[in-house]
Image (cartoon, rainbow, N blue to C red):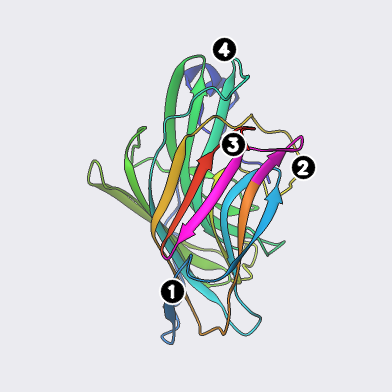
Amino acid sequence: MLFSVLFFHVFMATLTLAAPATSGEQAGTAPIAATVTVPAASTVAQDVDTNNWAGLALTVGSNAAVRSVTGAFTIPTPAVPPGGNSHEVYESAAWIGIDGYNCDSALLRTGVTFIYANGDVNANAWYEWYPSVDRTYYDIKVSIGNLITASVTAYTPQSGTVTLINNSTGAQTSVALGNADYAALCMNSVEYIVGDTTQPNGAGPSLPIPDFGTLAFSDAFVSLTPSASPLTDLLNIVQDGAALTSVSTEYDTITIKYIGDSE
């Protein structure tokens, strides 16, 4: 699943941005009342290797449904990875979402892309209801080093809300989404991810991932209808036999480190 990203002005000629959400995109019904909220990293996890995602994916059982996911992170400073070229472009994104890991039909997510390009770094904020195109938030700006809080809520399989708060500047935005043309969510998984913007092990071209140091999702909580035992996968990026990331968790915190091929 590829989506367009906001590069520096030298790339603007190739970028097509979707229009902002219209008044016709309104959230449908209120969330179901009988929900429970759990820390995302509180369950026993297993390790999974992917081509392009690092972080945590939590999957609920068939009798449960994900209602919302939230978390906070600081936008890292992207750098040239070991063995990289300082004159190339490197790009990654930190985001949270519903259904990217365990649903083939749809994904609702929001986050921040951070880019290294020829010695410059930049960041932009966006949301996406896959397979519709991603959309840049026009009413909020983000920068490297900003502390971001993001949340995604699914009211029904085809209505929800994405919210982004820039705690460093006080700016915030929220977009209500509801459209019968949206692909239906499965509402059975949540994700806290750093990586490129495709599905796990997804095919298709993408820019190489920069060295992003350490990024931690804190205050990571998931609301769902009662479920006995959510399943948790810790995802690490492995490319050409080398692990690029290392993930650890503690209660409501998911810590993702870029390690290159050091381990």
Q: Earlier in the sequence, mark 2 or mark 3?
A: 3
From mark 3 to mark 1, how far is it between C-alphas? Answer: 33 Å
Say above or below: 61 vs 89: below
Which quadrant of the view contains residue 123? top left
Q: Residues within 10 Å of mark 4 (few under 14, many from 20)?
A: few
Which quadrant of the view contains residue 197? top right
Amino acid of disc 3: Ser
From mark 2 to mark 1, how far is it between C-alphas? Answer: 33 Å
Q: Which residue is mark 2?
A: 203
Q: Earlier in the sequence, mark 4 or mark 1?
A: 1
Q: Which residue is mark 3?
A: 4
Q: Which residue is mark 4?
A: 87
Pair 3/1: label in front: 1
Q: Which residue is mark 1?
A: 38
Q: Earlier in the sequence, mark 3 or mark 1?
A: 3
- Is residue 42 or residue 115 the one in the foreground? 42
Amino acid of disc 2: Ala
The stretch of residues the image draws in magenta is 237-251
* Residue located at (57% from left, 12% from top): 87
Q: Is residue 196 visible?
A: no
Pair 2/1: label in front: 1
Q: Is residue 262 visible?
A: yes
User: Label 3's element?
Assistant: loop
* Residue located at (59% from left, 17% from top): 88
Say above or below: 152 vs 230: above
157 sits to left or right of 219: right
Q: Residues within 10 Å of mark 3 (few under 14, many from 20)?
A: some
* Figure quadrant of the C terminus: top right
